[in-house]
Amino acid sequence: PPAAPPAAPPAADPASSLLVRAAHGAPGPHPPVWFMRQAGRSLPEYRALRAGTAMLDACRDAATITEVTLQPVRRHGVDAAIFFSDIVVPLAAIGVGIDIVAGVGPVVDKPIRSVADLDALRPLEPGDVPYVTDAVRALTGELGATPVIGFAGAPFTLASYLIEGGPSKDHARTKALMHGDPQLWHALCSRLGAIAAAFLRVQIDAGAAAVQLFDSWAGSLSLVDYEQFVLPHSREVLAPLAGTVPRIHFGVGTGELLAAMRTAGADVVGVDWRVPLDEAARRLGPGAVVQGNLDPALLGADWPVVERAVRRVVAEGRAAAGHVFNLGHGVPPTADPDVLTRIVELVHSLDADGAGA
Ligand code: 1CP
């Protein structure tokens, strides 16, 4: 009979990665680093691959998702891969009329204005997004010890696109509906929360080692409104995932909401560039782990300016129980990819505890 194959070496395990350890507040040699929107338009290899393919079509093809997700890991040596998709992908997958228009963002055919419109939002089943399962599986196989971060849009941010019909600066219709018809608002957000939770589950079941819930536009709300209208629904998404993988929760302009967002069930709270990480740690309270928060606009400055700012962010992050280095929001399309690579190298040279840095 043929000789038995040699025992496979133990699989490298993302559960012991820098990212997962930092999320649990465990010490590491240096902060893990990844960038929101690292997979995307700042990379020439992304633009080449995407040429002629609509965004949502790219998000429905497992081979494309896998390649685009890997591109920034290969190029920059980041400590995590963010799954290439979009927050509206699960909505499109259940048949909501939505497209991602180049240069605009998500655009909805028939904005939600009444209870009858909720019929469009049926629950998401894993079979609705087979390309997500396939791509996460392929990625965890390719990446070994490097974690794949799954993500979803939080109920408020998804609701804002569905109600406004597209991107909005003031979220006026969203706030009018929230206050004017709280019953419809809560019914809408319950459905969106279930969809987001199911989308995260699919990614975790396929091997994602961490998840991020993006409530990008929650910073447009007062704390009182956030606590009454949004937090319960974000909690419905994150709380059931306790004990699975680390949960990161992020929004822009959320300085007033940080402590509340932590109580949604976040192991790591993302902070934009407006609040220094030591102040964020103070607002969050003991044991908090932070992610952030280099101002993306600084990527366009001369390297000595970038270097000083990166060192400051890492130093301020030491005030928290753990720190995942990131930008305060996504990589701008105009960013020079070489600057991102240099930032990764710099962060990797800095001690997490400050002893030798
Ligand atoms: O054709 C293109 O390349 C379109 C640009 C693009 C890309 C690359 C969009 C349209 N989405 C994405 C990918 C994407 N979207 C990722 C994966 C890549 C990565 O992070 O490396 C992620 C995590 C998202 C999530 C997303 N989509 C958020 C939350 C993150 C954030 O930036 O706050 C939001 C708000 C969206 C909506 C969206 N999709 C696309 C755009 C331009 C927008 C924002 C529109 C607006 O201003 O409201």
Image (cartoon, grey):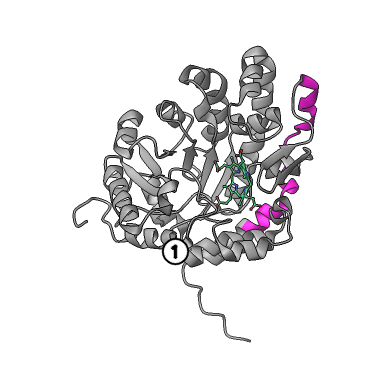
For image coordinates 75% across by 32% down, the residue present is 121
The residue range painted magenta reads: 115-135
Residue 336 percent location from the top left of the image: 47, 60
Tell me if I can see residue 180 in this picture.
yes
Which residue is more in the foreground, 347 or 228?
Answer: 347
Give the amino acid at mark 1.
Answer: Asp
**Which residue matches tag 1?**
338
Q: Is mark 1 within 8 Å of ligand 1?
A: no
- Is 145 contained in the magenta span? no
Which residue is more in the foreground, 255 or 195?
Answer: 255
Q: Is residue 239 above or below residue 87?
A: above
Which residue is more in the foreground, 48 or 241?
Answer: 48
Tell me if I can see residue 138 in this picture.
no
The quadrant where residue 117 appears: top right
Chief SS of the magenta region: helix
Total count of labels: 1
Residue 256 percent location from the top left of the image: 41, 25
Secondary structure, mark 1, is helix
